[in-house]
Amino acid sequence: MFWRFVSFDSRGTATLVTAIITAVIAVATLTPLPTAIDAPGSDKLHHFLAFAALSYPASAHIRRFSWPIVLTSTAFGGAIEIIQPYVNRSGEFLDFAADCVGVLIGVALALLVVRLK
């Protein structure tokens, strides 16, 4: 049961989870803030984890390495960093780098889980 859940056998479930994660990332990173949030952990760690979670469901469902998943996820991260200065946030290259590493780790973790299943 656990392996079936984390391997996203259902296309609909993988799509729904990916859409929810995308929306959460967009709201969390593009909502204007009057002051900085003091969240526990590193900002780069948050970016890494968010984008690993973003790329995981679709990769687990497809069950193979997919350039479209990697490219669209990293493009989303890049677009966020470009837009952030326009919504009173700071766009940083290192945030984008953390996004990219997160995408690759999310894909790799999904492929590992699928093989272990």
Image: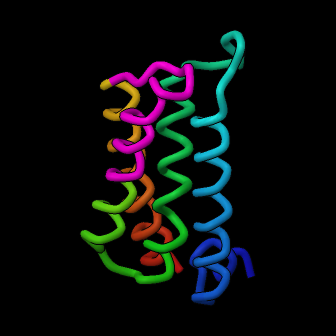
Q: Percent x, y for residue 74?
A: 34, 51
Whether residue 97 is situated above or below residue 65 in the rendered picture: above
Say which quarter of the image contains residue 13: bottom right
Tell which of 68 and 90 is nearer to you: 90
Q: Answer left or right for 60 relative to 63.
A: right
Taking the spot 44% from the left edge, 59% from the top edge, the residue there is 109
Magenta segment: does it hold 50? no
Question: Which quarter of the rendering shows the N terminus?
Answer: bottom right
**90 part of magenta stretch:** yes
- Of all residues, the one furthest to the left in this rendering is 67
Left or right position of 64 against 112:
left
Nearest the eye: 115 or 45: 45
Residue drawn at the location 42% of the way across and 67% of the way down: 112
Residue at image location 50% in from the left, 35% down from the top: 47
Farthest front residue? 86
Q: Position of residue 20 (x, y in %)?
A: 68, 62
Q: Residue at x 53, y 21 (%)?
A: 89
Q: How many marks?
A: 0
Which portion, as a residue range, is magenta? 74-92
Task: Judge whether 94 appears above or below 72 on screen.
Answer: above
* Protein image colouring: rainbow
